[in-house]
């Protein structure tokens, strides 16, 4: 094992199964399942391991990573051996990202599960190989389900696999490097910050977005992995010269980014057409594949709840479970008649199935007692705020509760940001944890000022909301 507290606290470092991170409630172990997909049986197994080796708390991060909390250092090697033996994780060596790509969790195609012997070429044996030699998706009949529905323009799972495979060959990428792969369907990923953004703009065609707002392309999706690898290689080369100053692509001086773009020989293009913000939970149908997205309140669940959800997923005939960057689970391959019972079971478990649930509009970090740096119990306070501020949240307002200034749950601005300070909060309106607070208050005072007619309610409801962000 390669775990150390100083390393864990270093900026830019990410925990994994082999390298856990020490926290206030034990060691945090982040899991990267092969292909970022599980079966219901595997979900049940991981929930059982979280209870056996950890404190039973399971989280899904805003980068759609799964992690278990409260693992004992003495039993961590046994946990890792079990995870590897049962192929529940596929960690690789090196300091680069364990998962380079982020995709929408509901896809047009079933999951791709490469055998260990199979090179991660991005070409699947078990799903339709890139129709016509491209990452194009199949056209389908008119959608029949309620909820969000539509088509995607590329097979984002296959494309992400190919980008992952190329990315792993590039030395020097930072652990947090992220490429968003957006299939162009109803689950737009525009709100997620990243280093590069690959967005489908037509069937089998993508554009590549840079952090400075420029877009390159359009290009055939089949060539995207090489093009992305070229841009990332240029980034890694510049970063190797000054690794502490350059952590993300956006940190590069403009002249260096210009040089990388020039070397790519890619033309500039217009940004993709804007799409509506996606629903983050509920039922979906993409290319006639019914699926449901279920949210974990503030991205956290206890292991027993997750086990029972896995059992309900089995009964519903789910084949794929992916992690959602909206801090939940996407279940696909469902029997249509089983969808409503599944959603009802999830709701009964206290999970989020209603797109208007106020808990979806609040981001909260682990807080006390889970985190050593926490100055408040962020999750408990977020639950109180969700209930008390429901009328305000229904207007589209967003709240971020961060138990310290580090801002693990949400890096950007929110309509109301609360930063933990000695049990209370610095209160920031329309800003992030780094912005100037208007006051430092305890939770009861904040709740009082969020009531209709009080100053925080008025300030937040009168201004245009930043809205739910990630
Ligand atoms: S933001 Fe929250 S989880 Fe992150 S270090 Fe601070 S207290 Fe801990």
Image (tube, rainbow, N blue to C red):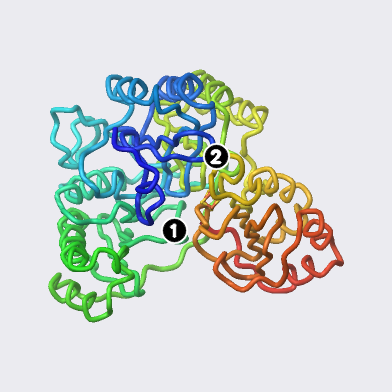
Q: Is residue 136 visible?
A: no
Residue 247 or residue 25, whichever sits in front: 25
Front-most of residues 88 and 77: 77
Which dot marks residue 243? Answer: none
- The quadrant of the picture occupied by the N terminus is top left
Instruction: Assess disc 1: are there few (<14), some (14-19) or many (≥20) residues with their C-alpha within 10 Å of its C-alpha.
Output: some
Residue 28, image x, y percentages: 44, 36
Label 1 secondary element: loop
Dot 2, crowdedness within 10 Å: few (<14), some or many (≥20)?
Answer: many
Residue 349, position as x, y percentages in the image: 64, 28
Name the residue tied to disc 1.
192
Residue at x-position 58% and y-position 72%: 435
Name the mark on residue 283: 2
Q: Is residue 135 left or right of residue 398?
A: left
What distance separates the C-alpha of mark 2 from that of mark 1? Answer: 22 Å
The x, y position of residue 102, in whole percent, is: 36, 49
Q: Which residue is found at the position 62% from the left and 35% from the top?
A: 351
């Amino acid at each position: 094992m390669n775990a150390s507290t100083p390393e864990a606290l270093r900026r830019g470092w990410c925990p994994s199964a082999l390298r856990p991170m020490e926290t206030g409630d034990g060691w945090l172990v982040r899991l990267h399942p092969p292909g970022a997909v599980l079966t219901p049986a595997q979900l049940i197994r991981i929930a059982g391991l979280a209870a056996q080796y950890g404190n039973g708390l399971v989280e899904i991060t805003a980068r759609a990573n799964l992690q278990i909390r409260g693992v004992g250092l003495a039993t961590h090697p046994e946990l890792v051996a079990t995870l590897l033996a049962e192929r529940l994780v596929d960690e690789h060596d090196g300091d680069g990202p364990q998962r380079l790509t982020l995709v929408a969790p509901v896809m047009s195609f079933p999951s791709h599960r490469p055998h260990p012997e199979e090179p991660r070429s991005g070409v699947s044996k078990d799903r339709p190989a890139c129709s016509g030699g491209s990452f194009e998706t199949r056209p389908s009949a008119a959608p029949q389900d309620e909820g969000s529905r539509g088509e995607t323009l590329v097979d984002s799972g296959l494309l992400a696999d190919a980008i992952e495979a190329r990315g792993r060959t590039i030395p020097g990428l930072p652990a947090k490097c992220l490429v968003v792969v957006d299939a162009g369907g109803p689950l737009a990923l525009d709100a997620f910050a990243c280093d590069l953004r690959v967005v489908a703009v037509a069937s089998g065609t993508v554009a590549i977005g840079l952090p400075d707002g420029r877009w390159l392309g359009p290009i055939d999706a089949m060539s995207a992995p090489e093009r992305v690898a070229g841009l990332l290689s240029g980034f890694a080369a510049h970063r190797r010269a000054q690794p502490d100053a350059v952590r993300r692509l956006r940190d590069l001086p403009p002249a260096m980014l210009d040089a990388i773009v020039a070397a790519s020989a890619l033309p500039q293009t217009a940004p993709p057409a804007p799409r509506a913000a996606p629903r983050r939970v509920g039922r979906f149908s993409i290319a006639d594949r019914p699926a449901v997205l279920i949210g974990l309140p503030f991205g956290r669940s206890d292991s027993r709840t997750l086990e029972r959800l896995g059992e309900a997923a089995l009964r519903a005939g789910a084949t794929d479970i992916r992690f959602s960057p909206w801090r939940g689970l996407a279940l696909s391959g469902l029997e249509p008649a089983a969808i409503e019972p599944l959603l009802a079971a999830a709701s009964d478990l206290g999970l989020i199935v209603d797109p208007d649930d106020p808990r979806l509009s609040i981001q909260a970090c682990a807080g006390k007692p889970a985190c050593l740096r926490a100055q408040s119990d962020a999750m408990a306070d977020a639950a109180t705020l969700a209930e008390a501020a429901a009328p305000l949240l229904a207007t589209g307002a967003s709240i971020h509760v961060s138990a310290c200034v580090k801002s693990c749950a949400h890096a950007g601005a929110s309509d109301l940001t609360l930063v933990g300070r000695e049990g209370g909060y610095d209160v920031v309106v329309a800003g992030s944890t780094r912005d100037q607070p208007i006051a430092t208050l305890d939770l009861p005072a904040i709740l009082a000022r969020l009531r209709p007619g009080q100053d925080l309610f008025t300030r937040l409801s009168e201004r245009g909301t930043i809205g739910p962000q990630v």
